[in-house]
Image: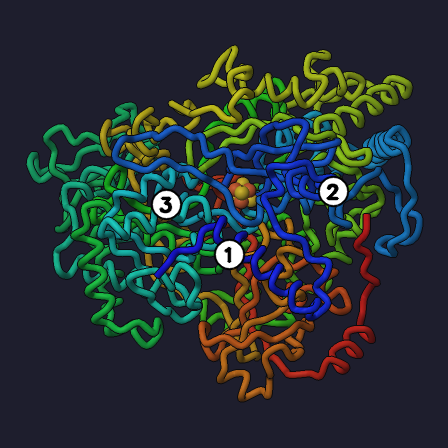
């Protein structure tokens, strides 16, 4: 067959045209001209050809990433024309770290890639605004920066003089993740003496079981460490949706032969690609892992040498009171934090080195052989005999209660499958359990994570052999903290989840929703016991929660979407009775209720640096475009407020005051904020952050801004990982290789806790508990709210490009069976409800979820719902008592590591089908406030 060339086509066209002309002007085609190659001759009307090219033209190029809570941190090149960002492209220039592992290029996702459009959306705040009507009424007055900062500063000082220090919540939410933005809000809070909540537990991301076991949940791996694993369990982890730039390492590992297992109650996009999907019943996860541990122990698949060297399962426990044997039991001046094991070689008890009280800071056994079995006897101070057993026996006794055949009805996972996967995990060369943050948002998350870390530990999967990994580490934050806490001055750090629980009085909805008897039967405590434990923890100062707040200055914290229950916003607005300021990029469902909204510069409009937990590159933001409207970088906003405060404090003749351990002085607050005028703008701050970083050093800033990123070759702030230039980052290498102690009470991986509350709740060793769920309420269906595919939390959630990918309005997933039972149609309206609240949404029928499950991706803005009623209207929540302990070794309040979490998935709901008209009518009738979106 002849191939047609362009020349043939032109010849044919000309011939055809001539023939048609000769045929008496048939079909009126008299005006047709022969087509020749227009590119080779003069042709007057060619300007249109340039439109497409002009769309791609730009004046300037700069670099940025996205300062959102995705942990992607992907370097983009930003192209700007006439002051408008035209497009962004992944720069894809990161160097390869190890020869045998692919590089991390090109990092990015479809969400970040629409920011050049989204930054000009209607919800962008462009000018400082002051409330002109009632709170939330949507009436605003545009004011100058000078007026806004002047009035806010005046009010802050009034509050200080009227109520005393520490009455302002000056909080930065998870919308700020880059170092300049983080340092701005934190430094302001530190100099003010404001209350700053733990932003990690605020959003329910605190990996408490990981901290309990290892001492630090911020020691984690980079995603390239997944690449050469041969077995990976995804637990509440859906990287194809939530770790888009990192997911390839998992799928490349699979291509190389790794077995990928996903454990989730929904058939999510990661489960789809896995070798095995374990469709676990919601809330039953710890039972499955305890069964796997039972199999590993029963079939002797565990690593005895690792257990003896690295874990506290060797420590001796008293038979009489189940407490660890301490030096204080045996010596008059003995310490509480020195422990013992039985050495089978010398046949006597010996001090276990490496504990908090031990001077010998090593895990090395130096020829000793700790017993894991047997009974032993020592004499106490009075000469009485104390009978002892290694904690291993207690751990094993508990684990043996959970053979897979016994748990399969609870978990929905066949016993043979559990047995087979436990064997594969134990025999793997390098195995991970990768835990998503949703595992921290369930009541039994601490049990789940504790069991998971133990499963890794007893099989020797730690360090370069894998282990438990959660998605955040503090790699590269050294200088951020220097700026955040000037001269060591700190804000009043408060518990995140517990602080929000108390300020929002969430116990009221918990009491309305949960059935106390059912709750006790399901989770082991009831609401009365939970409240008593919470109050005891706060009263004894184990967990800090500050009372008497009268104002809130929030930066990038969408509190009124995230928090649970229908009355949270109302109660917080009462707390913020004197002043409520929101500093944000967008007019969020929270900013709508503020007294003042202050427009922050977005990702492409400010100098900044962002480090990443999942890869080793620090990205530079070079402010490629000017801020829209009158928006300002966070540093300049806080700087302006401190300037006004300082002027007014001097005029008021205020003096320095001792505030706990810190001397604060509002007459110098601006000087201190700007470091004596050295840090005047976001560029100077970014340069300070980079050039003073111990791993980058002077001159690095200039180098970094030429290519958009710098590479972390070491990490003083993460020494345990022993960061090396040519290897992925693995956690706990100092422990597994160099035998240095873990940051725990015993210096060992901790699987025995003898705190009285742990004893009271039968939780001294890893065990299984359910979450609350519908079983603890009088409503039939579980309500599950995983992370969204089409946004990063509430960021870009209302953007039109994201909305086009889904249903264009909030929707809930229901199974075909539930739809049939309830008369729900795909695309039809439903009301989701329980005793505390309701919301209206569209139904999407999917076979990918269970029949007793109502699922909705989280973080829709409240204003996207009919009647402004967001999805958390139906969510009652609890506090996990074990997380309130603050007086046991490493279990003490520590921001970002140890304090109670916000929990999201504990409620039961019911659902009913409505017509569109009914939904609208009911929503409007019960509308609490009109929606107001435009900034
Ligand atoms: Fe990367 Fe996050 Fe931006 Fe997506 S939103 S491109 S993951 S930084």
The residue tagged 3 is 469
Tag 3 or tag 1, which sits nearer the N-term? 1
Tell us which disc is closer to us: 2 or 3.
Answer: 2
Tag 1 or tag 2, which sits nearer the N-term? 2
Q: Position of residue 575 (x, y in %)?
A: 77, 49
Q: Element under label 1?
A: loop
Q: Element under label 3?
A: strand
Tell us which disc is closer to us: 1 or 3.
Answer: 3
Q: CA distance from mark 1 to mark 3?
A: 16 Å
Kindly identify which numbered label has been placed on residue 45: 2
Q: Position of residue 535 (x, y in %)?
A: 59, 52
Q: Quadrant of ligand 1?
A: top right
The residue tagged 1 is 441
The reply to whether residue 146 is in sight is yes
Q: Position of residue 246 (x, y in %)?
A: 41, 44
Residue lying at 43% horizontally and 55% vertically, measured from the top left: 4
Residue lying at 63% horizontally and 48% vertically, measured from the top left: 499
The reply to whether residue 554 is in sight is no
Tag 3 or tag 2, which sits nearer the N-term? 2
Q: Position of residue 553 (x, y in %)?
A: 75, 39
């Amino acid at each position: 067959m002849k191939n047609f060339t362009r020349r043939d086509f032109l010849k044919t066209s000309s011939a055809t045209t001539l023939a048609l002309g000769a045929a008496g002007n048939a079909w009126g085609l008299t005006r047709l001209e022969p087509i020749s190659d227009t590119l080779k001759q003069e042709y007057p009307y060619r300007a249109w050809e340039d439109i497409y090219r002009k769309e791609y033209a730009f004046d300037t190029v700069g670099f940025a990433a996205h300062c959102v809570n995705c942990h992607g941190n992907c370097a983009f090149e930003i192209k700007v024309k006439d002051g408008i960002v035209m497009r962004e492209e992944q720069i894809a220039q990161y160097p390869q770290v190890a020869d045998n592992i692919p590089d991390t290029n090109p990092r990015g996702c479809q969400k970040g890639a629409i920011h050049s459009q989204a930054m000009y959306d209607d919800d962008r705040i462009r000018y400082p605004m002051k409330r002109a009507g009632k709170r939330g009424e949507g009436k605003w007055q545009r004011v100058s920066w000078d007026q806004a900062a002047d009035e806010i500063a005046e009010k802050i000082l009034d509050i200080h003089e009227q109520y005393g220090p520490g009455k302002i919540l000056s909080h930065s939410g998870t919308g700020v993740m880059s170092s300049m933005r983080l340092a701005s809000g934190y430094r302001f809070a530190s100099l003010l003496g404001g209350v700053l909540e733990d932003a990690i537990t605020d959003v329910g991301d605190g990996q408490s079981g990981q901290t309990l076991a290892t001492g630090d949940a911020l020691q984690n791996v980079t995603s390239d460490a997944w690449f050469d694993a041969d077995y990976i369990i995804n637990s509440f982890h859906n990287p194809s949706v939530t770790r888009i730039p990192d997911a390839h390492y998992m799928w490349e590992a699979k291509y190389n032969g790794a077995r990928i297992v996903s454990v989730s109650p929904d058939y999510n996009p990661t489960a789809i690609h896995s070798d095995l999907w374990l469709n676990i019943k919601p809330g039953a996860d710890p039972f499955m892992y305890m069964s796997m541990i039972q199999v590993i122990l029963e079939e002797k698949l565990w690593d005895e040498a690792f257990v003896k060297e690295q874990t506290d399962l060797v420590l001796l426990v008293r038979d009489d009171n189940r407490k660890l044997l301490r030096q204080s039991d045996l010596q008059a001046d003995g310490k509480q934090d020195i422990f013992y094991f039985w050495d089978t070689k010398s046949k006597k008890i010996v001090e276990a080195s490496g504990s908090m009280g031990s001077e010998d800071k090593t895990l090395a056994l130096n020829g000793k052989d700790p017993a894991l079995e047997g009974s032993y006897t020592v004499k106490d101070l009075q000469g009485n005999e104390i009978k002892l057993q290694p904690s291993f026996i207690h751990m094993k006794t508990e684990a043996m209660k959970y053979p897979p055949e016994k748990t399969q009805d609870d978990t929905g996972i066949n016993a043979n499958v559990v047995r087979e996967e436990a064997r594969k995990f134990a025999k793997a060369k390098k195995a991970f359990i990768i835990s998503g943050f949703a595992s921290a948002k369930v009541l039994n998350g601490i049990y789940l994570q504790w069991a998971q870390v133990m499963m890794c530990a007893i099989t020797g999967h730690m360090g370069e052999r894998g282990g438990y990994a959660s998605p955040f580490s503090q790699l590269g934050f050294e200088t951020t903290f220097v700026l955040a806490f000037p001269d060591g001055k700190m804000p009043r750090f408060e518990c995140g989840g517990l602080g929000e629980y108390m300020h929002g009085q969430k116990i009221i909805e918990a009491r309305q929703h949960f059935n106390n008897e059912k709750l006790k039967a399901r989770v082991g405590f009831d609401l009365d016991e939970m409240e008593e434990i919470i109050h005891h923890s706060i009263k004894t100062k184990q967990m800090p929660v500050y009372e008497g707040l009268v104002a809130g200055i929030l930066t990038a914290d969408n509190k009124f979407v995230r928090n649970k229950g229908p009355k949270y916003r109302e109660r917080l607005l009462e707390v913020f009775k004197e002043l409520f300021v929101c500093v944000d990029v967008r007019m969020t469902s929270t900013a709508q209720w503020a007294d003042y909204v202050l427009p922050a510069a977005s990702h492409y409009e400010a100098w900044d640096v962002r480090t990443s937990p999942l890869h080793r590159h620090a990205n530079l933001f070079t402010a490629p475009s000017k801020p829209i409207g009158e928006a300002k970088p966070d540093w300049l906003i806080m700087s302006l407020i401190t300037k006004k405060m300082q002027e007014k404090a001097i005029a008021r003749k205020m003096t320095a005051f001792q505030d706990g351990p810190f001397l604060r002085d509002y007459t110098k607050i601006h000087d201190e904020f700007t470091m004596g005028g050295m840090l005047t703008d976001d560029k100077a701050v970014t340069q300070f952050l980079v050039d003073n970083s111990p791993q980058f050093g002077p001159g690095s800033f200039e180098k970094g801004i030429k290519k958009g990123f710098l590479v972390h070759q070491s990490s003083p702030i993460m020494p345990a990982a022993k960061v090396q230039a040519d290897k992925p980052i693995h956690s706990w290498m100092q422990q597994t290789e160099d035998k240095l102690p873990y940051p725990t009470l015993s210096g060992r991986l901790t699987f025995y806790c003898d705190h009285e509350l742990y004893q009271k709740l039968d939780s001294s060793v890893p065990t299984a508990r359910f979450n609350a769920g519908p079983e603890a309420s009088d409503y039939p269906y579980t309500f599950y709210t995983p992370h969204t595919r089409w946004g990063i939390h509430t960021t870009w959630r209302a953007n039109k490009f994201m909305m086009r990918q889904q249903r264009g309005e909030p929707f809930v997933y229901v199974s075909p069976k539930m739809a049939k039972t309830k008369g729900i149609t795909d695309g039809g309206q439903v009301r989701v409800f329980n005793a505390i609240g309701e919301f209206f949404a569209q139904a999407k029928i999917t076979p990918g979820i269970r029949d007793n499950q109502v699922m909705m991706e989280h973080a829709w803005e409240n204003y996207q719902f009919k009647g402004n009623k967001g999805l958390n209207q139906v969510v009652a929540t609890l506090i996990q008592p074990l997380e309130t302990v603050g007086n046991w070794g490493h279990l003490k309040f520590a921001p970002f590591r140890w304090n109670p979490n916000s929990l999201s998935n504990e409620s039961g709901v019911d659902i009913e089908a409505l017509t569109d008209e009914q939904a609208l009518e009911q929503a409007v009738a019960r509308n609490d406030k009109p929606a107001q979106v435009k900034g």
